[in-house]
Amino acid sequence: MLSEKTVKKFLDELASNSPAPGGGSVAALAGALGAALTSMVCNLTIGKQKYAAVEGEMKTLLTKSEELRRTFSILIDQDTQAFNKVIEAYGLPKETDDQQALRSAAIQAATKEATLVPLSVMNHVIDALALTKVVAEKGNVNSMSDAGVSALILHAAAESAALNVQINLNSIKDSEFIGWKSDEVRSLLRTSQSMKDEIMEIVKQSLETSKA
């Protein structure tokens, strides 16, 4: 599994001439990194006397962010698996009319499935950003830069996943599916951008206050 490789081995495989893992897996990895940073801020807040009033909330947030980290980690592999199914579909025989019809249907089905993985990444990014906003507001002020990086990389995950949705939609013939998923992508990107901006404003104000 890609998520169980060392960083070096993952990067080596990513840099190779194999098309998978690719941008979709990297988008999911970015989501996992953002969630992990949120968990770190929680852990650096829990147990500190100064933040005793929010300790229970931080523990709850930690559980949720760790669940998201696991989900994103699974999506790293799911994206590559979905891409491989598309490649397998393109490899089906096409000598007869029946074979061509089966091959075309298999390609469309596999491509739709491959579209849903980065869309799942985008949806989970929104959940992760909601947690990051709370830790930015209430977490250890000494870790505010980490909360900011979490927000930035989570939004990058959303934007990256959106590109992978779009490239798959370009190969799909179902206009209804294209319309629904395109609308969903636009909505998720707007939400992610807005949440990221809100978090960065909180982080910047916190950094300015601590400097003073």
Image (spheres, rainbow, N blue to C red):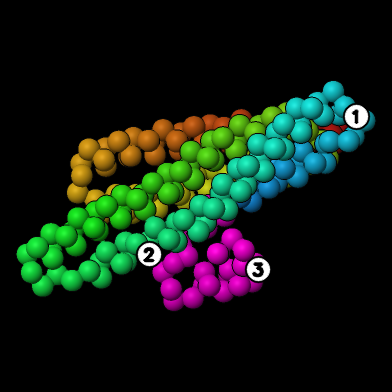
Q: Which residues are magenta?
A: 1-30
Q: Position of residue 62 (x, y in %)?
A: 72, 38
Q: In the rendered image, is residue 187 in sight? A: yes
Could you tell me which secondary element the residue under label 2 belongs to?
Answer: helix
In the drawing, what numbered circle is on residue 50? 1
Q: Residues within 10 Å of mark 1 (few under 14, many from 20)?
A: few
Question: Do residues under tags 2 and 1 come within 8 Å of each other at their CB atoms?
Answer: no
Apparent side of residue 50 relative to residue 118 in the rendered image (left or right): right
Neighbor class of circle 3 (other Cα within 10 Å; few <14, some 14-19, many 20+) is few
Rendering coords of residue 187 (x, y %): 41, 33
Disc 2 residue type (three-letter): Asn
- The image shows residue 110, relative to residue 35, as above or below, that is below
Mark positioned earlier in the residue sequence (3 or 1): 3
The residue closer to the viewer here, 209 or 63, is 63
Instruction: Spot the residue most to the left.
Output: 97
Seen at 23% across and 58% down, the residue is: 106
Q: Is residue 3 above or below residue 188?
A: below
